[in-house]
Image (cartoon, grey):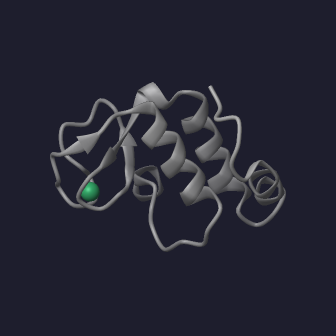
């Protein structure tokens, strides 16, 4: 599942660059957004099965696939100003 517009070229360039590991994770998230949700406390992407955020212990999440995809792209195409929860595991 992919969004039709928005930054496709940038995303592909990033997969070839030093951000490739992060981008691969993001790609996986974008392919299966229903398995993830976004913490409303710290904007991290966490797996759908967690009850509380591993980063900030928040318990409010946005589980809409559109929001997950957008956030995954955002995280993949910028430097580490935010963290995908898996990075900490
Ligand atoms: Zn959080």
Q: Quadrant of ligand 1?
A: bottom left
Image side of residue 73 versus residue 41, left or right: right
Examine the image and state in which quarter residue 3 appears. Answer: top right
Residue closer to the observer: 57 or 4: 4
Task: Residue at 59% x, 51% y: name it.
Answer: 73
Q: Quadrant of the N terminus?
A: top right
Q: Position of residue 11 (x, y in %)?
A: 74, 53
Instruction: Give 78 or 16, whichever is nearer the viewer.
Output: 78
Specify the quadrant of the image occupied by residue 37: top left
Q: Residue at x 81, y 63 (%)?
A: 17
Looking at the rendering, which quadrant does residue 83 occupy? bottom left
Look at the picture and state if 82 lies above or below 59: below
How many marks can you see?
A: 0
Residue lying at the far front of the rendered structure: 5
Looking at the picture, how far across and down is residue 40, in whole percent? 26, 53
Percent across and percent down for residue 59 are 15, 46
What residue lies at 70% left-to-right and 42% top-to-bottom? 5
Q: Is residue 63 left or right of residue 26?
A: left
> From the viewer's perspective, is 14 left or right of 63?
right
Residue 46 on image: x %, y %: 37, 44
Residue appearing at x 58%, y 36% in the figure: 30
Q: Is residue 70 left or right of residue 11?
A: left
């Amino acid at each position: 599942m992919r969004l039709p517009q928005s930054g496709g070229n940038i995303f592909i360039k990033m997969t070839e660059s030093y951000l490739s590991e992060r981008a691969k994770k993001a790609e996986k998230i974008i392919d299966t957004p229903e398995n993830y949700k976004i913490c409303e406390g710290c904007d991290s992407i966490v797996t759908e099965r967690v009850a509380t955020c591993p980063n900030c212990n928040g318990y409010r999440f946005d589980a809409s696939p559109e929001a997950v995809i957008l956030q995954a792209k955002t995280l993949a195409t910028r430097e580490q100003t935010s963290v995908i929860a898996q990075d900490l595991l």
